[in-house]
Amino acid sequence: MTAAGPPQGGRPLGGAARSAVRGEPTSAAPPDRAAYRGRFAPSPTGPLHFGSLVAALASYSDALAAGGAWLVRIEDVDEPRSRAGAEEAILRTLADYGFRWDGPVVRQSARTAAYDAALARLRAGGFVYPCTCSRRALETAPLGPAGERIYPGTCRAATAPAQGSSPRVAQRVRVGDADVEFVDLLQGRQRQQLARDVGDFIVKRADGLYAYQLAVVVDDADARITTIVRGADLLVSTPRQIFLQRLLHAPTPAYLHVPIAINAAGEKLSKQTRAPALPSAPLPALLRAWRFLDQPAPASVPRTVADFWAHAARAWSRARLPPVPMLPAPGGG
């Protein structure tokens, strides 16, 4: 995987502060499993649904097949969107469906110090600048491939706002002429010219919360994630994350973006499109997700969840994954 190098003056990330997290009964990660480290990172905005299950199953199966470690991170950096009880429901569903994670669950809401340290390094390198543009001010900017407004650089050359002159100041990272290219393990070679397709993007929001793009880069680096298996809807975000990895001198993991499930209207299954929560009976849903990913059928129908995962660990095949980014969800999902 390659990307344009960072502007001169960038500094390495170093050891960002680790979060203090609540402990759950989990398995310890043996030292010999450190070569492969994967993760699943749901947002606590509602219960898991079939689309969530597809991503979790692909990520966990890939880790099992590699004999690697698999971590769970709760992506609640956007705290206002979190729903009470959603995290507990997500972890309970994962456990009921036979997922076993290594180490404690990490929560982004407990990792502000790590994000502060990363932002300080970006500032020291001259890579970020304050932005006072409102959403309304950007309404006429063109839409990029990510479906977001391409930032026109309004505040890039402006001096810092006077003390107290604007209560809402975001932090944007300068992308310059960065041309980011990488090879996805399923979707193939990808390339994005950041200035043309995205523009300078936000790493800390005007409301004081950190943006997903920075948080996920810091989290993956601190957790030593080697392989990220997730839905193809996040493929368009990957170049921004690789760009930040370069600025922070953080390693770039391998990426594998699997197909996402869509409903009859062609919309991604999500909480926003009212995707139903996963059923309480795990085995039929696991088998549906397995078939959705075109994985080898077991010789006989698994009788238990443990039987299913034993088969998944043996039979998982990246080569069989359908490269089509979006596929209709099967009935009953």
Image: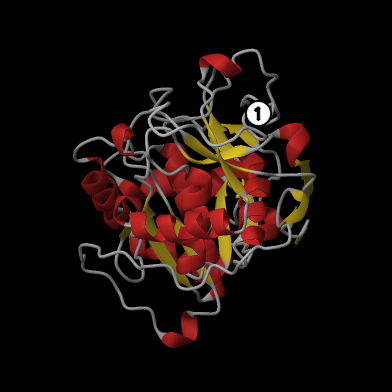
How many marks do you count on the picture? 1
Instruction: Label 1: state its secondary structure.
Output: loop
Q: Which residue is mark 1?
A: 151
In this image, 45 relative to 52: left or right?
Answer: left
**Residue 91 x %, y %:** 27, 52
**Residue 143 x %, y %:** 68, 22
Q: How is the image coloured?
A: secondary structure
**Residue 227 x %, y %:** 58, 64
In this image, 179 relative to 276: left or right?
Answer: right
Depth check, front residue: 59 or 201: 201
Residue at left 55%, top 53%? 123
Residue at left 68%, top 45%? 322
As drawn, 304 above or below 25: above
As drawn, 80 above or below 137: below
Specify the quadrant of the image occupied by residue 223: bottom left
Q: Is residue 46 visible?
A: no
As drawn, 95 above or below 139: below
* Quarter occupied by the C terminus: top left
Q: Residue furthest bottom?
A: 32
Within-10-Å neighbours for mark 1: few <14, some 14–19, many 20+ = many
Depth check, front residue: 106 or 130: 130
Residue at left 25%, top 63%? 21
In this image, 187 relative to 13: left or right?
Answer: right
* Quarter occupied by the N terminus: bottom right
Q: Is residue 296 visible?
A: yes
Q: Amino acid at mark 1?
A: Tyr
Specify the quadrant of the image occupied by residue 163: top left
Specify the quadrant of the image occupied by residue 176: top right
In this image, 250 relative to 178: left or right?
Answer: left
Depth check, front residue: 302 or 88: 88
Residue at left 38%, top 56%? 73
